[in-house]
Amino acid sequence: MALTKEQIQQIAAQTRSSFESGSFAPTGVQCLFDDVHDAIDTAIRAQHQLMDMSLEERGKLIEAMRVCAREHAEELAILAHEETGYGKVPHKIAKNLLAANKTPGIEDLHPTAFSGDNGLTLVETAPYGVIGAITPSTNPTATIINNSISMISAGNAVVYNPHPAAKRASQKAMELLNEAIVKAGGPNGLMTAAKEPTLDTSKVIMTHKAIKMLAVTGGEAVVGVAMKSGKKCVAAGPGNPPVIVDETADIAQAAKDIVDGASFDNNVLCVAEKEVFMVNSIADSLMNTMEKCGAYRVYGEDIDKIVRTVLIQKDGKYVINRKFVGHDATYILRESGVQFSGDPVLVIADVDRYHPFVEVEMLMPVLGMVRVNNFDEALDEAFRAEHGCQHSAMIHSSNVHNMSRAARRMNTTIFVKNAPSYSGLGFGGEGYTTLTIATPTGEGLTSAKSFTRARRCVLKGDFRII
Ligand code: NAD
């Protein structure tokens, strides 16, 4: 997994030149179109062809997509990193592999039956048809792999509108997966997109009559637009995941887990630790141990320098300066004019509870650390800092009562106890994975069944066996 800088540059250059010459796709296989309407029409045709295939054949297409995603995990990670400047290549490889290996396939679809005096009723999980999917810049290729496996397993086709800032990496992932499907005997165009995804193409997709479902993964703005579309919508919105550390926590483990989770891919994961509430009695020990695990602690004027560099004031509120999203801790420190030594992976700052490092979804390896008097105060503040997103939260504690109280009160879609945040995505934790955690619309960790509609068939009379 350890690639030299030269190897990374070489793979990225090869990828870029194949992309520019349009040479990824074999002859006749096309999933990118000048006109978004052609992308939609192709997806409609492909979905009809998919419906003519057996479930077993569909399963083989999904397997081919997994193999393809594994084979290209590294190349896609490098391309995403090069295009967006976000995160770290090894972590992006890990996310691509996670999506390839742990996104549920057709086995996720379960029919149900009712059998009684009046006969038999069968409820099946049917596809929506063509889904319009908006994907983020932060996990571009892993989201395409994950969404495509989920949506196609459910029998759908998907027209993507990837984030313009990550369009090359996203479209490359689509082309490779599309090609793998065609090679495995499936239809061309189960994933399509406009060559130039824009807000206009997004509008066409969101309002097109043939698109029956939207799946959006991103910030507040896109979630708001999709939820007003009048279509069935699976919306995966922002979070601001807090971490609670109480006096009963295993401090060495908590410190390592928080540093690992908050620095993973430079904090661009929506589930990643975004601020910490630590009870006073263990606060110094926690921060000292985090420094030994790769965090760099900043004080006083240095904290203000970072605020002025990575945040912008807009309408009386702080918002992130996109230039620093997903960038290395060392880059952030250097650009802020902070003197430091070593090669830290995370910046930590002992701040008050209303500090912007606490309030803002930073999406970079800068973590506000807040001292509180006791567990109750930690829980109140964590609840407030999560801003009602109901997304993710973490606790480090050995007090089962505190863990249960926090889980109930936080009421988040993902709640992780004594582990890094990414365990909640099945990475080092149990359970399947997704890169689309549908918080506002309630599907939670999406999988094939999230992209189905229930259909009921009723047979009166004979078919029962008892
Ligand atoms: P973003 O909101 O800038 O962009 C996401 C997508 O929405 C992009 O494709 C973008 O082009 C599109 N978009 C933005 N505004 C739009 C509008 N008005 N109309 C139509 N489309 C619009 O997000 P990003 O920076 O790429 O990703 C980071 C954000 O996404 C964070 O807030 C993060 O928490 C969230 N996120 C959530 C999940 C989840 O599963 N819940 C997963 C990944 C990212």
Image (cartoon, helix red, strand yellow):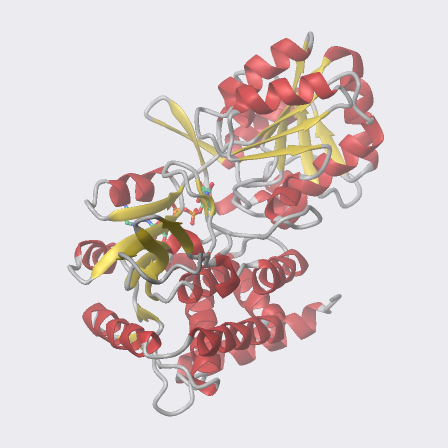
Estimate the x, y position of residue 122 in percent, counting from the top left. Answer: 35, 56
Furthest residue to the front?
Answer: 466
Toward the bottom, the furthest residue is 27
Question: Is 423 placed left or right of 286 in the picture?
Answer: left
Q: Position of residue 322 (x, y in %)?
A: 45, 44
Name the image quarter holding residue 228. top left
Q: Position of residue 100 (x, y in %)?
A: 58, 65
Q: Which is more toward the observer, 368 or 303?
A: 368
Quadrant occupied by the C terminus: bottom left
Residue at 37% x, 67% y is 155
Give the answer, above or below, for where 153 lies relative to 333.
below
Q: Is residue 270 left or right of residue 21?
A: right
How many numbered marks are there?
A: 0
The residue positioned 59% from the left and 43% from the top of the image is 267
The relative height of residue 8 versus residue 107 in the rendered view (above or below) is below
Indicate the quadrant where residue 153 lies.
bottom left
Q: Tell me the quarter of the image containing the N terminus.
A: bottom right
Question: Is residue 192 at all visible to an observer of this figure?
Answer: yes
